[in-house]
Amino acid sequence: MKTVIIFLYITVLTAPACFAQSKTHAEKSGNPIFPGWYADPEARIFNNTYWIYPTYSAPYDRQVFFDAFSSTDLVHWTKHRDITDTSKIKWAHRAMWAPAIVEKDKKYYFFFGANDIQNDQQVGGIGVAVADKPEGPFKDYLGKPLVDKFHNGAQPIDQFVFKDTNGSYYLIYGGWGHCNIARLNNNFTGFIPFKDGTTFKEITPDGYVEGSVMFKRKGKYYFMWSEGGWTGPDYSVAYAIGDSPFGPFKRIGKILQQNPAIATGAGHHSVINIPGTDSWYIVYHRRPLGETDGNSRVVCIDKMYFDAKGFIKPVVITKAGVDKFILDKK
């Protein structure tokens, strides 16, 4: 009897220590990954650090600044407040959203849409700001929009900057069901016309609405976009695969959408590829259950996988998020 009592006593004493060790090992990001109403996240890796640049999700007249978030492990995030706003971008006065960012020659170029222009007579479109650090502060680069007109029917919003393996930079953008691609010049002050003399080529696939993203994997170009209405539960992400940044892109299918048991309105995303690996993450916004306001959106992250043929598997949206992952500093 004494032996049994001692054994139980030891078990009770040692069990909490084992549990604590397991909990540390299995640390996850959770979803959403940081608090607040944010949407349209642009995810990048700069200097062995993960960065996310989202839209501040609010009515257009209050959507006049950007915050950024950084993490070294995908779990713990630091907020960088007001990296730029309408006081620094004089031509912008409302509806700043869907940023894109790229590092070039030790400068950080921050692309954004502003003013939600509805025609070519209004002032606004896609602008550029620049900073010496990924956390800014970002100052107006051009003093005017980079794209301020409707070309091929595309509203100048939802821009993405894609760097090809040959060193070329492309601006891919568009709302109102049209998507254009244009080649940026060396200092991002304008564009290099294509051989046929055009500057903006339409690459719109079936189902395209907005939120373009492009990346290259194993020699193929993956073009992704958002479908449906951003205020509704059926907002989602679909994709196509092409042999060049110009396609042609034929829609393959949806890979990100709502799970009515977890969240709705899952869309407008970006992707992270861990350098030197085939490990991928999708960063996106979604609407918590019970929220009906169109601006009630939060930023989440989940893993993204490919099958043996190179097709993207449907993303499983989760409450747990992803495991802690620290980038190799070598």
Image: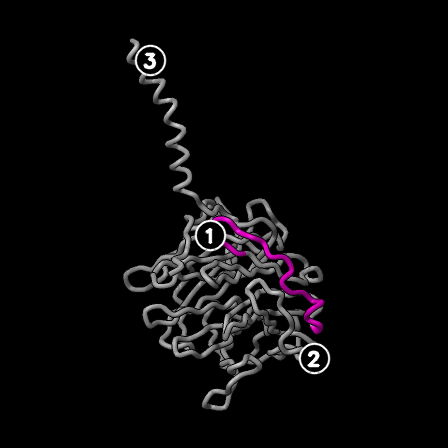
**SS type, badge 2:** loop
Seen at 61% across and 74% down, the residue is 127
Disc 3 marks which residue? 5
Q: Name the residue under label 1.
A: 74
Residue type at tag 1: Leu
Specify whether residue 234 is in view.
no
What type is the residue that disc 2 sits on? Gln
Mark 2 = which residue? 121
Residue 19 rendering spot, x and y as whole percentages: 39, 32
Near-viewer residue (132 or 266): 132
CB atoms at circles 3 and 2 under 8 Å apart?
Answer: no
Q: Is mark 1 on a helix, strand or loop?
A: loop
Q: Amino acid type of disc 3?
A: Ile
Q: Earlier in the sequence, mark 3 or mark 2?
A: 3
* Label 1 Cα neighbours within 10 Å, binned few <14 / some 14-19 / many ≥20: many
Identify the magenta region. Answer: 70-91
Q: How far apart are marks 3 and 2 (CA)?
A: 85 Å
274 drawn magenta:
no
Residue at x 41% of width, y 48% of height: 323
| Secondary structure of the residue carrying numbered label 3 | helix
Crowding at mark 3 (Cα within 10 Å: few <14, some 14-19, many 20+): few
Work out whether mark 1 precedes mark 2 in sequence or the reverse, and give the earlier one.
1
Please state the horizontal and vertical placement of residue 83, each as a whole percent of the image.
62, 62
Mark 3 or 2: in front is 3
Please say whether residue 105 is visible from this viewpoint: yes
Residue 247: % across, % down: 40, 76
Residue at 38% x, 37% y is 22
Q: Is residue 305 left or right of residue 118?
A: left
